[in-house]
Amino acid sequence: MLLWGVTGLVMRILALVMLILLIFFSPASAYGRSVEDLVGSFSVQKTVKLASSIDCISSQDTSDPLIPPQSYPSALADDQAPSLAGFAFEPAFVPVNASRTVNFTAHIIDDQCVWASAAYFSSPSGSEKARVLFAAQDLTSGTNKDGYYSSRALMPNVNETGYWHLDNITLVDRESNRRILWPEDLSGMGLPTTIAIKKL
């Protein structure tokens, strides 16, 4: 009986030694520290494509410049539309018989990438329309996450005079998230919403 007890004790010690050696020399890849975590081999592989600035501003042949090309997977989900931090134009008064070119500037911010934006104006009667586009090539300073865009627009050659009113500004990011700002939104921010076309 004594021999059997000694043999059993030796076997238990050997098993414990083998277990310790398995813990320290096992090729298992794991972050856990328990025996269950370290028994066996584990491998985790994940490929993540990060969107680059080139992907962000790539061009697309489309009739609607506010529709970005098919989006690419990115490391971070983007469900936030861009924001408008500033909007201005000059001159605010345009003589009807002179050059009707108006210079526009927009400060646009997005958490990942601005794609394009547009400001839409209507004549006093609503019969004439004008659009000002801010695309990637109009970025004059900053980045496509926080940048200043400049664009020029030639107001239509019409006899109708008076105040052309902003219909809306539409902001779009690379993932097609869209924000539409109405005249009251811009007025609440202290930004201009009308262009006067008058005879001298």
Image (tube, rainbow, N blue to C red):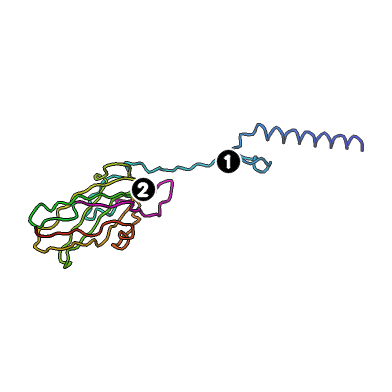
Q: Where is residue 23, by image quadrant?
A: top right
Query: What residue is at 70 percent from the left and 32 percent from the top?
Result: 21
Cα distance in 3D space between marks 1 and 2: 30 Å
Expressed as whole percent of the image width and height from the top left, the position of residue 109 reads 35, 49
- Main SS, magenta region, reads loop
Say if 25 sits above or below 80 in the image: above
Query: What residue is at 24 percent from the left and 45 percent from the top?
Result: 138
Label ID, residue 42? 1
Q: Give the residues in magenta.
A: 68-90
Say if 175 sits above or below 185 in the image: above
Q: Amino acid at mark 2?
A: Tyr
Q: Where is residue 161, by image quadrant?
A: bottom left
Residue nearer the viewer, 46 or 111: 111
Magenta-drawn stretch contains 88: yes
Q: Residues within 10 Å of mark 2 (few under 14, many from 20)?
A: few
Q: In the displayed structure, does residue 49 sit left or right of residue 140? A: right
Label ID, residue 197? none
Label ID, residue 72? 2
Q: Amino acid at mark 1?
A: Phe
Residue nearer the viewer, 142 or 192: 192
